[in-house]
Image (cartoon, coloured by chain):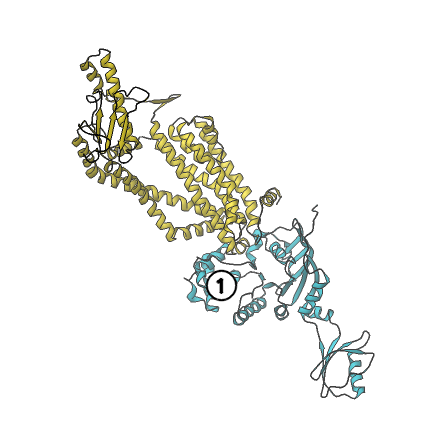
């Protein structure tokens, strides 16, 4: 089931096409990666999905119906990249305030806050102020306040920035648990290793346009360059052939790129015919990081300011 | 609506619980009362007594100079401008024989400045003596002259100016309405800045703490802005009420204290010098308090509350707009605030005219245009001469003005609050205002 669908979304600023005709849809319960370099338009896109900005044109469908901020906002949890808390306010009161702003009843909110505080071992924090917390601690609190009202759609913009590996894992586990329970998660970042680990589907945008879309698996397949890693008991001398090129050599391994029109089996055959003893043969898929850099390089890396004519 | 209420509640509670709030709310009236009573007290205690040695070459002044409780005149022999100090005088007055000629002048020598009051008193004595001399030269009998001089004009009649408007008449007391008008105008002027700046700082805090975007994903920017403004308004009203209660309570307490002790002292000074009838500052304070109660408080108080709130609301949203566009640099706030502070300061200048001339055209217009009406109208109202239609028009235009500023400010605020790391120019703000949403 599709929970969120964007249709030809556009948002132009005076000097930039921040979001320029972007469409995609997100399945319920999936973890969706929204990727792009700095200034690609991710934040603008997220602000439209959270009802902070209105699109200049195009539609947002939430659960199949036109997105209405006032009605749908309680079902969305948004942790923006520029985030923070009231420094002088007590932590418990702050969590309660933010939950009630999302429309929760005081009693329900208290109960949820207690559950989460126990889960994250934050019970002793209740009467402390944000000023007293370390950056990692306040990030945890920020995450809790984002998910307290059990949103159907959770939007996390760079959720791990400033977190140590232990706390990163803690939050990552919670993200997986929430997804299993049916929460849809939009995960925006430019840290590709996290995307590979967490996301099912991704969209890559640059300069306000969508340049890549699909499942992580599929995208890797689509972007693969027929590179294999072959291991030997004894590294043979390179030899002339029309099937593959040796890209690099390391220890007892060749990295080879198969020429157009040949199958991996032909490589194996060639080495066997040559009399070498092979101990391993693996396909090397490009990392998302490589794909990201490759795709973004295709377009200009830095956004240029341009004159936009708004009809 | 429910969400605005939550925001108001948070603003109010976090501010009222703050230590600075509690301190300033209690200390300010104490300071205020203390200041008034200290100055009243010192004006009684510290009037410098002068003993002036007079050399009168003509001998015509000697008879008409009269000492009072502050200045004593004596006519010793063998005195000059160099030795008066050793002989125990504080000043030396020399009246030459030809004091009327252009070449000569009456000179007053003193060790330190006598002060305007004392110099004026000396001049009055001189003028009286010259006038008396003129009367006598024109064959007016000395006895008749003395009896005329002894008349205390002010005690012979009662003066009651009355204002008549249609069939309403009211006791007029220009001094009182001047004082009340001035005081209330200044109070509104100061509170506009205090609470306006509080709104601005609050908005800046939300922007810099980066909580603005978190909240705006739950409520509309306008709700956040208006909630903050109303919350701080509630804080302002709370503070004002506490001040009023404290000031009224404390001054009653101090007055009873003063009347017992200081007034007694003041009377002692009066009788020792021998001239009665001069009321002291403390007595003056008591009569002032009684006259104060005679003002038309039933009109002034509600109007004061209205203009206090209305003026605050009118300007607070503008202060919020400024707060939303400021980045980390506080200097930026200074220059962006200028277009807001200018009309407030201008209102204050009009106020100084309006208290004296409540019906001058600039006072009338200043009290109707919402930019200056909160400060100027409250200065005019105590005079009792403001027609009802002007008050109604002024109030309506202030309400309309508030709706307008709130609408414009919301447009700036909505964009500004999410804009980081960019210095905003007035031109850009102008563009935001005229962009359709």
Which residue is at 46% across, 37% downward? B345
Decide if residue A131 is on the left or right side of residue B180. Answer: right
In the rendered image, residue A25, in percent from the top left (x then y), is placed at: 67, 60
Residue B428 visible in the current orientation: yes
Which quadrant would residue B307 be assigned to in this image? top left
Which quadrant would residue A273 be assigned to in this image? bottom right
Which one is in front, A62 or B437?
B437
Residue designated by label 1: A138
What chain letter is assigned to the residue under label 1? A
Q: What colour has chain B?
A: yellow
In the rendered image, residue B184, in percent from the top left (x then y), is placed at: 38, 36
Q: What colour has chain A?
A: cyan
Which residue is at 82% across, 74% downward? A261
Which one is in front, A80 or B332?
B332
In the rendered image, residue A235, in percent from the top left (x then y), is placed at: 73, 86
| B222 shown above or below B355 | below
Decide if residue A99 is on the left or right side of residue A301. Answer: left
């Amino acid at each position: 089931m599709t929970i969120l669908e964007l249709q030809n979304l556009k948002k132009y600023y005076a000097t930039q096409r921040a979001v320029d005709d972007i469409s995609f849809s997100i399945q319920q319960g999936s973890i969706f990666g929204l990727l792009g370099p700095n200034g690609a338009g991710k934040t603008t896109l997220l602000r439209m999905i959270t009802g902070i900005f209105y699109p200049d044109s195009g539609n947002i469908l939430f659960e199949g119906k036109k997105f209405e901020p006032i009605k749908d906002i309680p079902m969305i949890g948004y942790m923006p990249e520029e985030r923070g808390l009231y420094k002088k306010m007590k932590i418990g009161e702050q969590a309660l305030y933010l939950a009630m702003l999302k429309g929760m009843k005081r009693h329900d909110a208290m109960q949820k806050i207690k559950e989460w505080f126990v889960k994250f071992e934050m019970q002793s924090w209740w009467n402390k102020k944000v000023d007293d917390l370390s950056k990692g601690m306040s990030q945890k609190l920020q995450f809790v306040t984002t998910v307290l009202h059990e949103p159907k759609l959770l939007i996390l913009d760079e959720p791990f920035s400033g977190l140590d590996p232990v706390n990163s894992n803690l939050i990552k586990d919670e993200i997986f648990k929430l997804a299993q329970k049916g929460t849809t998660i939009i995960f925006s970042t430019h840290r590709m290793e996290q995307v590979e680990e967490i996301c099912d589907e991704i969209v890559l945008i640059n300069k306000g346009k969508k340049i890549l879309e699909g499942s992580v698996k599929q995208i890797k397949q689509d972007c693969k360059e027929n590179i294999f890693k072959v291991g030997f008991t004894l590294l043979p001398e390179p030899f002339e052939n029309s099937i593959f090129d040796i890209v690099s050599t390391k220890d007892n391994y060749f990295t080879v790129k198969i020429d157009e029109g040949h199958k991996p089996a032909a490589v194996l055959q060639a080495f066997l015919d040559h009399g070498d003893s092979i101990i391993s043969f693996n396909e090397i898929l490009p990392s998302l990081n490589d794909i990201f850099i490759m795709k973004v390089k295709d377009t200009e890396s830095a956004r240029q300011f341009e004159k936009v004519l708004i009809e | 609506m429910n969400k605005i209420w939550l925001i108001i509640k948070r603003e109010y509670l976090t501010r009222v619980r703050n230590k600075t709030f509690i301190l300033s709310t209690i200390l300010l009236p104490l300071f205020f009362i203390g200041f008034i009573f200290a100055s009243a007290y010192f004006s009684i205690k510290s009037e410098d007594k002068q003993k002036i040695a007079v050399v009168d070459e003509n001998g015509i002044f000697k008879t008409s100079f009269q000492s009072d409780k502050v200045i004593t005149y004596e006519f010793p022999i063998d005195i000059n401008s160099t030795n008066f100090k050793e002989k125990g005088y504080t000043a030396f007055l020399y009246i030459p024989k030809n004091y009327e000629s252009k070449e000569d002048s009456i000179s007053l020598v003193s060790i330190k400045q006598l002060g305007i009051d004392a110099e004026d008193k000396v001049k009055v004595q001189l003028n009286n003596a010259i006038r008396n001399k003129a009367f006598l030269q024109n064959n007016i009998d000395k006895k008749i002259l003395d009896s005329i001089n002894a008349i205390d004009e002010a005690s012979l009649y009662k003066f009651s100016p009355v204002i008549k408007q249609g069939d309403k008449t009211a006791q007029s007391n220009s001094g009182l309405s001047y004082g009340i008008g001035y005081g209330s105008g200044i109070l509104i002027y100061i509170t506009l800045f205090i609470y306006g700046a509080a709104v601005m700082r609050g908005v800046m805090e939300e922007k810099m703490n980066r909580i603005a975007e978190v909240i705006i994903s739950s409520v509309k920017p306008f709700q956040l802005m208006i909630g903050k403004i109303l919350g701080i308004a509630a804080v302002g009203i709370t503070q004002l009420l506490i001040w009023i209660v404290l000031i009224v309570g404390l001054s009653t307490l101090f007055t009873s204290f003063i009347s017992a002790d200081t007034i007694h002292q003041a009377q002692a000074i009066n009788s020792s010098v021998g001239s009665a009838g001069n009321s002291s500052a403390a007595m003056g304070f008591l009569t002032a308090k009684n006259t104060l109660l005679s003002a038309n408080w039933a009109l002034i108080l509600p109007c004061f509350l209205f203009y206090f709130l209305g003026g605050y609301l009118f300007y607070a949203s503008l202060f919020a707009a400024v707060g939303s566009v400021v980045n980390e640099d506080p200097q930026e706030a200074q220059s962006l605030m200028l277009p807001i502070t200018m009309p407030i300061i201008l209102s204050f200048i009009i106020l100084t005219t309006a208290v004296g001339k409540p019906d001058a055209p600039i006072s009338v217009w200043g009290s109707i245009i919402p930019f200056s009406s909160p400060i100027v109208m409250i200065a005019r109202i105590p005079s009792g001469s403001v027609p009802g239609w002007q008050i109604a028009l002024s109030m309506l235009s202030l309400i309309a003005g508030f709706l307008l500023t709130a609408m414009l400010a919301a447009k700036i605020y909505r964009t500004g609050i999410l804009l980081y790391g960019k210095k905003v120019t007035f031109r850009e703000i102008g563009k935001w205002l005229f962009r359709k949403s």
